[in-house]
Image: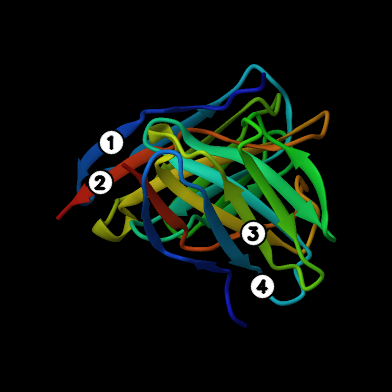
Amino acid sequence: KAGVTQTPRYLIKTRGQQVTLSCSPISGHRSVSWYQQTPGQGLQFLFEYFSETQRNKGNFPGRFSGRQFSNSRSEMNVSTLELGDSALYLCASSSHRVPSNTGELFFGEGSRLTVL
Amino acid sequence: TQLLEQSPQFLSIQEGENLTVYCNSSSVFSSLQWYRQEPGEGPVLLVTVVTGGEVKKLKRLTFQFGDARKDSSLHITAAQPGDTGLYLCAGVSAQGGKLIFGQGTELSVKP
Protein backbone atom coordinates (compact mmCIF):
# COMPACT_ATOMS: atom_id res chain seq x y z
CA LYS A 1 0.00 0.00 0.00
CA ALA A 2 1.10 3.58 -0.58
CA GLY A 3 3.12 5.17 2.17
CA VAL A 4 2.81 8.55 3.83
CA THR A 5 3.05 11.36 1.30
CA GLN A 6 4.23 14.82 2.23
CA THR A 7 4.20 17.87 -0.02
CA PRO A 8 6.09 19.92 -0.85
CA ARG A 9 9.42 18.15 -0.29
CA TYR A 10 11.45 21.34 -0.30
CA LEU A 11 10.55 24.97 0.06
CA ILE A 12 12.24 28.29 0.71
CA LYS A 13 10.47 31.16 2.42
CA THR A 14 11.48 34.49 3.87
CA ARG A 15 10.93 35.77 7.38
CA GLY A 16 7.40 36.92 8.06
CA GLN A 17 5.82 34.72 5.42
CA GLN A 18 3.54 31.81 6.16
CA VAL A 19 3.69 28.23 4.94
CA THR A 20 1.29 25.31 4.63
CA LEU A 21 2.52 21.72 4.53
CA SER A 22 0.40 18.77 3.53
CA CYS A 23 0.38 15.14 4.63
CA SER A 24 -1.57 12.21 3.21
CA PRO A 25 -1.50 9.25 5.62
CA ILE A 26 -1.55 5.58 4.77
CA SER A 27 -5.01 4.53 3.69
CA GLY A 28 -7.08 3.55 6.72
CA HIS A 29 -4.87 5.35 9.23
CA ARG A 30 -6.77 7.90 11.27
CA SER A 31 -3.93 9.29 13.37
CA VAL A 32 -1.55 11.89 11.96
CA SER A 33 1.28 13.36 14.01
CA TRP A 34 3.63 16.16 13.08
CA TYR A 35 7.24 16.55 14.21
CA GLN A 36 9.92 19.17 13.72
CA GLN A 37 13.43 17.79 13.24
CA THR A 38 16.53 19.93 13.61
CA PRO A 39 20.18 18.93 14.14
CA GLY A 40 20.89 18.52 17.83
CA GLN A 41 17.24 18.83 18.89
CA GLY A 42 16.01 15.58 17.44
CA LEU A 43 12.30 15.16 16.77
CA GLN A 44 10.13 17.63 18.59
CA PHE A 45 6.43 16.79 18.76
CA LEU A 46 4.12 19.41 17.30
CA PHE A 47 0.64 17.89 17.43
CA GLU A 48 -1.44 14.79 16.80
CA TYR A 49 -4.77 14.59 15.05
CA PHE A 50 -7.16 11.68 15.27
CA SER A 51 -10.51 11.64 13.52
CA GLU A 52 -10.28 15.35 12.70
CA THR A 53 -9.64 16.36 16.32
CA GLN A 54 -6.37 17.60 17.80
CA ARG A 55 -5.65 15.10 20.57
CA ASN A 56 -2.30 16.30 21.79
CA LYS A 57 -0.07 19.33 21.35
CA GLY A 58 3.61 19.97 21.89
CA ASN A 59 5.32 23.04 23.29
CA PHE A 60 5.31 25.23 20.22
CA PRO A 61 3.98 28.78 19.87
CA GLY A 62 0.56 29.51 18.45
CA ARG A 63 2.15 30.33 15.09
CA PHE A 64 2.14 26.59 14.52
CA SER A 65 -1.28 25.17 13.77
CA GLY A 66 -2.78 22.24 11.99
CA ARG A 67 -5.94 20.51 10.98
CA GLN A 68 -7.17 17.18 9.74
CA PHE A 69 -9.81 16.58 7.12
CA SER A 70 -12.49 13.91 6.97
CA ASN A 71 -10.32 11.80 4.65
CA SER A 72 -7.55 11.89 7.33
CA ARG A 73 -5.30 14.12 5.24
CA SER A 74 -3.65 16.75 7.39
CA GLU A 75 -2.12 20.15 6.95
CA MET A 76 0.09 22.19 9.20
CA ASN A 77 0.57 25.91 8.95
CA VAL A 78 3.31 28.13 10.27
CA SER A 79 2.63 31.84 10.23
CA THR A 80 5.06 34.74 10.60
CA LEU A 81 8.05 32.55 9.82
CA GLU A 82 11.26 33.01 11.79
CA LEU A 83 14.78 31.90 10.88
CA GLY A 84 14.60 29.29 13.65
CA ASP A 85 11.69 27.59 11.92
CA SER A 86 14.08 26.18 9.33
CA ALA A 87 13.80 22.44 9.79
CA LEU A 88 12.61 19.15 8.40
CA TYR A 89 8.92 18.74 9.17
CA LEU A 90 7.90 15.11 9.42
CA CYS A 91 4.43 13.70 9.32
CA ALA A 92 3.66 10.26 10.69
CA SER A 93 0.51 8.20 10.44
CA SER A 94 -0.68 5.38 12.62
CA SER A 95 -3.63 3.08 12.85
CA HIS A 96 -3.69 3.75 16.60
CA ARG A 97 -3.94 6.93 18.59
CA VAL A 98 -0.50 8.06 19.61
CA PRO A 99 0.98 7.28 22.03
CA SER A 100 0.32 3.60 21.95
CA ASN A 101 2.40 0.78 23.36
CA THR A 102 2.05 -1.21 20.20
CA GLY A 103 1.31 1.33 17.54
CA GLU A 104 3.94 1.89 14.88
CA LEU A 105 4.48 5.31 13.38
CA PHE A 106 4.91 5.40 9.62
CA PHE A 107 6.80 8.50 8.60
CA GLY A 108 6.79 10.42 5.37
CA GLU A 109 10.00 11.70 3.82
CA GLY A 110 9.40 15.15 5.25
CA SER A 111 9.15 18.70 4.02
CA ARG A 112 12.40 20.62 4.30
CA LEU A 113 11.70 24.26 5.04
CA THR A 114 14.37 26.90 4.74
CA VAL A 115 13.60 30.37 6.06
CA LEU A 116 15.83 33.17 4.77
CA THR B 1 9.54 17.37 31.43
CA GLN B 2 10.38 13.84 30.41
CA LEU B 3 13.60 13.46 28.49
CA LEU B 4 15.25 10.63 26.65
CA GLU B 5 18.99 11.05 26.40
CA GLN B 6 20.89 9.10 23.79
CA SER B 7 24.59 8.44 23.80
CA PRO B 8 26.80 8.76 22.01
CA GLN B 9 25.48 11.48 19.73
CA PHE B 10 27.98 10.60 17.00
CA LEU B 11 29.76 7.34 16.29
CA SER B 12 32.17 6.60 13.46
CA ILE B 13 33.50 3.05 13.23
CA GLN B 14 35.05 0.62 10.79
CA GLU B 15 33.13 -2.20 9.17
CA GLY B 16 33.13 -5.30 11.34
CA GLU B 17 33.29 -3.51 14.68
CA ASN B 18 30.65 -3.85 17.39
CA LEU B 19 28.86 -0.90 18.97
CA THR B 20 26.25 -0.05 21.57
CA VAL B 21 23.91 2.93 21.64
CA TYR B 22 22.21 3.92 24.87
CA CYS B 23 18.88 5.58 25.59
CA ASN B 24 18.39 6.76 29.17
CA SER B 25 15.78 8.58 31.20
CA SER B 26 14.89 9.26 34.82
CA SER B 27 11.27 8.47 33.96
CA VAL B 28 9.54 5.14 33.54
CA PHE B 29 8.26 4.27 30.10
CA SER B 30 5.54 1.76 29.33
CA SER B 31 7.22 0.96 26.03
CA LEU B 32 10.17 2.03 23.98
CA GLN B 33 10.74 2.01 20.26
CA TRP B 34 13.86 2.25 18.12
CA TYR B 35 13.79 3.85 14.69
CA ARG B 36 16.44 4.24 11.99
CA GLN B 37 16.48 7.20 9.66
CA GLU B 38 18.52 7.35 6.48
CA PRO B 39 19.37 10.62 4.73
CA GLY B 40 16.43 12.08 2.83
CA GLU B 41 13.96 9.70 4.37
CA GLY B 42 11.70 9.51 7.38
CA PRO B 43 12.43 7.26 10.37
CA VAL B 44 11.50 3.58 10.06
CA LEU B 45 10.54 1.47 13.07
CA LEU B 46 13.03 -1.27 13.97
CA VAL B 47 11.55 -2.67 17.17
CA THR B 48 9.20 -2.05 20.09
CA VAL B 49 10.04 -3.31 23.59
CA VAL B 50 7.35 -3.39 26.25
CA THR B 51 8.43 -5.60 29.16
CA GLY B 52 11.19 -4.66 31.61
CA GLY B 53 14.27 -6.78 30.89
CA GLU B 54 13.00 -7.71 27.44
CA VAL B 55 15.59 -8.54 24.78
CA LYS B 56 14.76 -8.60 21.09
CA LYS B 57 17.04 -9.52 18.21
CA LEU B 58 16.81 -8.38 14.62
CA LYS B 59 19.61 -10.11 12.69
CA ARG B 60 22.79 -8.39 13.95
CA LEU B 61 20.87 -5.89 16.10
CA THR B 62 20.04 -6.64 19.73
CA PHE B 63 17.66 -4.41 21.68
CA GLN B 64 17.23 -4.47 25.44
CA PHE B 65 14.73 -2.72 27.69
CA GLY B 66 16.01 -2.03 31.19
CA ASP B 67 14.50 -3.88 34.13
CA ALA B 68 13.12 -0.62 35.54
CA ARG B 69 11.88 0.45 32.10
CA LYS B 70 13.89 3.69 32.29
CA ASP B 71 16.55 2.82 29.75
CA SER B 72 17.25 0.83 26.63
CA SER B 73 20.22 -0.17 24.53
CA LEU B 74 20.86 -1.12 20.94
CA HIS B 75 23.85 -3.33 20.20
CA ILE B 76 25.05 -3.93 16.65
CA THR B 77 27.40 -6.82 15.98
CA ALA B 78 29.83 -6.69 13.07
CA ALA B 79 28.57 -3.36 11.75
CA GLN B 80 28.25 -2.92 8.01
CA PRO B 81 28.15 0.26 5.87
CA GLY B 82 24.44 -0.38 5.35
CA ASP B 83 23.91 0.23 9.08
CA THR B 84 24.86 3.88 8.60
CA GLY B 85 22.09 6.23 9.66
CA LEU B 86 20.46 8.09 12.51
CA TYR B 87 19.16 5.86 15.29
CA LEU B 88 16.33 7.25 17.38
CA CYS B 89 14.76 5.91 20.51
CA ALA B 90 11.20 6.92 21.38
CA GLY B 91 9.31 6.25 24.59
CA VAL B 92 5.70 6.21 25.69
CA SER B 93 5.54 7.49 29.27
CA ALA B 94 3.96 5.29 31.91
CA GLN B 95 1.54 8.12 32.67
CA GLY B 96 0.43 8.38 29.08
CA GLY B 97 0.80 11.54 27.04
CA LYS B 98 3.15 12.13 24.19
CA LEU B 99 5.60 9.87 22.42
CA ILE B 100 9.01 11.29 23.38
CA PHE B 101 12.00 11.01 21.03
CA GLY B 102 15.66 11.07 21.96
CA GLN B 103 17.94 13.39 20.00
CA GLY B 104 19.40 10.51 18.04
CA THR B 105 22.74 8.81 17.47
CA GLU B 106 24.40 9.45 14.12
CA LEU B 107 26.22 6.26 13.12
CA SER B 108 28.74 6.09 10.29
CA VAL B 109 30.22 2.73 9.33
CA LYS B 110 33.20 2.99 7.00
CA PRO B 111 34.17 0.14 4.67
Q: Which residue is mark 3?
A: A75
Three-letter residue code for mark 4? Ile
Q: Which residue is at 85% across, 61% downward?
A: A51
Q: Which residue is at 55% across, 58% downward?
A: A21
Chain for numbered disc 2: B
Q: On residue B11, which mark appears? A: 1
Specify whether disc 1 shares its chain with disc 2: yes
Asked if the residue at tag 2 contacts the one at tag 1, i.e. Cβ–Cβ closer than 8 Å, the answer is yes
Give the spatial CA distance, label 4 vs label 1: 33 Å
Three-letter residue code for mark 3? Glu
Asked if the residue at tag 1 contacts the one at tag 4, i.e. Cβ–Cβ closer than 8 Å, the answer is no
Chain for numbered disc 3: A
Mark closer to the observer (3, 4): 3
Is the residue A66 above or below the residue A39 in the image? below
First of labels 3, 4 by sequence position:
4
Q: Which residue is at 40% across, 50% downward?
A: A113
Q: Which residue is mark 4?
A: A26
Front in this rendered view, residue A14 or B82: A14
Q: Which residue is mark 2?
A: B108
Three-letter residue code for mark 1? Leu
Specify whether disc 4 shares its chain with disc 1: no
